[in-house]
Image: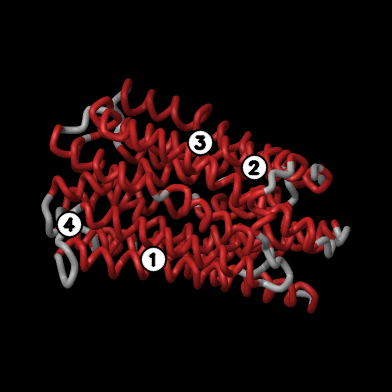
Amino acid sequence: MKKYDKIMMRRVLGLSWPVILEMSGVMLTGVLTTAMVGRLGAVALASVGIATMVQLASAMVVSAFGTGASAIVGRESGAGQWGEVRRTTGQALSLGALLGSLVAAAGFFGASPLFRIIGAEEAVAETAGRLLEILFLFTPVFLMMSIGNAVLRGLAKTRTAFFIGTFSNLVALVLSYLLIFGVGLPRLGVMGVAWSTGVGQLLGGLVALAVLKLNPQIALRWKDLLEWRMDSIKKILRISLPAAMEQAALQGGRITFTFMLTGVGAVQFAAHQIALQVESLSFLPGFGFSVAVMTLVARSLGRNRSRLAERLVRVTGWLAVTTMTVMAAIFLIFAEPLTGLFITDPDVIYWGTYCVMIAAFEQPTIALTYVLAGAMRGAGDTRWPMYVTILGVWVFRMPLVYLFVKVLGWNIVSVWILTALDFLVRSFVLWQRFRTGEWKRVY
């Protein structure tokens, strides 16, 4: 390997590890919060699960506007255009607050009816609705934190974003314990989760805003937040709307996918959920490499170094495929013990083991999908990641899952095979787009 490639690898790894740790912190916070809520009973646990899923799904769609901001900030900072970086940051934060307020209003008034429409039992629907009303109140500040961190990643400041995310998670975790069980604070039970999560997001959003104001290169001003600049807004929307549509397709598919799989029975559905938990470990490095390549591609293209951008994608792809192939080997060898960490039921372990082993075969294609999509987002070519997500989830996977599970009554293993084929199709289409080089000329 050339010395220059080794330098690029160190750069990629330096940007990736804070993102991986940040996402690990999110997962750990979720696990510990779930453990605390589990002591309150099944209704509380189910309510928190579905309320959080809906709130995050809706917030992820709107927070995709951070993708456009990150790509523009990365490109303009690479070109040394710090005035444009400041304007883009301010407009993206204001846009996030506005859209977040609209989502919060819609979610607050639509939370309770939603769970009754989807058929949740009355106790779960009522509790989840109340939780969601509280969670949606904090959506604007959650989006400010999310977009602020996206901007920082675009500036290659992934460590700062990691510290802000970790601070928010720690606040939420400590407050959850105090409010759920009434330790030194009023005992709110399951509602304590919603309030503690919201307060963590509020403080995280304020810290992100303070960092962007105090950063000497950005020096964000109130004027940048309060004055609408349609040229900047249009540029952000042009790159962000496809990313938001991609997230809508992905999150909608995830929820639909979950409801469709209830037909396989409790044992196989439990095995599926456990296999997802195991496989999610491999998504952490994939997401970290995706963010790193997005930042580096944007900055390289901002300096008019398109050949360097392409080389960075190849080096990052090699790192991601190698790392996730190691994960694949671990899944294959330790599939049964990994499944057994979550449950002792032998039937669930049997099906979960098969699912984890199939998950091993999709790791290289997931790695390629993450890296290539991240590179295209950094270049401003957000349409193609959107196209392949819609193709993979709604044209390929969903109809076939419906056919095999709902119509033919096949077991959960068929679903995991289809998922592996889905990522194979997505990675192939993205690779063909990458080879054309057109993604470098979209911005």
Q: Distance between the residues labelled 4 and 3?
A: 33 Å
264 vs 246, nearest the viewer? 246
Residue 310 visible within the image: no
188 vs 270, nearest the viewer? 188
Which amino acid lies under the numbered mark 3 shown in the image of this protein? Ala
Picture quadrant where residue 171 is located: bottom left
Which of pointers 1 and 2 lies earlier in the amino acid sequence?
Answer: 1
Which of pointers 2 and 4 lies earlier in the amino acid sequence?
Answer: 4
Q: Where is residue 101 in the image (x, y as percent from the top left)?
A: 47, 41
The reply to whether discs 3 and 2 touch (Cβ–Cβ < 8 Å) is no
Which amino acid lies under the numbered mark 4 shown in the image of this protein? Leu
Q: Name the residue under label 3.
A: 248
Side of 42 relative to 367 (left or right): left
395 vs 85, nearest the viewer? 85
Which of pointers 1 and 3 lies earlier in the amino acid sequence?
Answer: 1
Q: How far apart are marks 3 and 2 (CA)?
A: 12 Å
Q: Mark 1 points at which residue?
A: 169
Q: Mark 4 points at which residue?
A: 188
Q: Mark 2 points at which residue?
A: 240
Which of pointers 3 and 2 lies earlier in the amino acid sequence?
Answer: 2
Mark 4: secondary structure: loop
The reply to whether discs 4 and 3 touch (Cβ–Cβ < 8 Å) is no
Binning the other alpha carbons within 10 Å of mark 2 as few (below 14), some (14 to 19) or many (20 upward) gives many
Mark 1: secondary structure: helix
Which amino acid lies under the numbered mark 2 shown in the image of this protein? Ser
Q: Position of residue 54 (x, y in %)?
A: 36, 41
Mark 2: secondary structure: helix
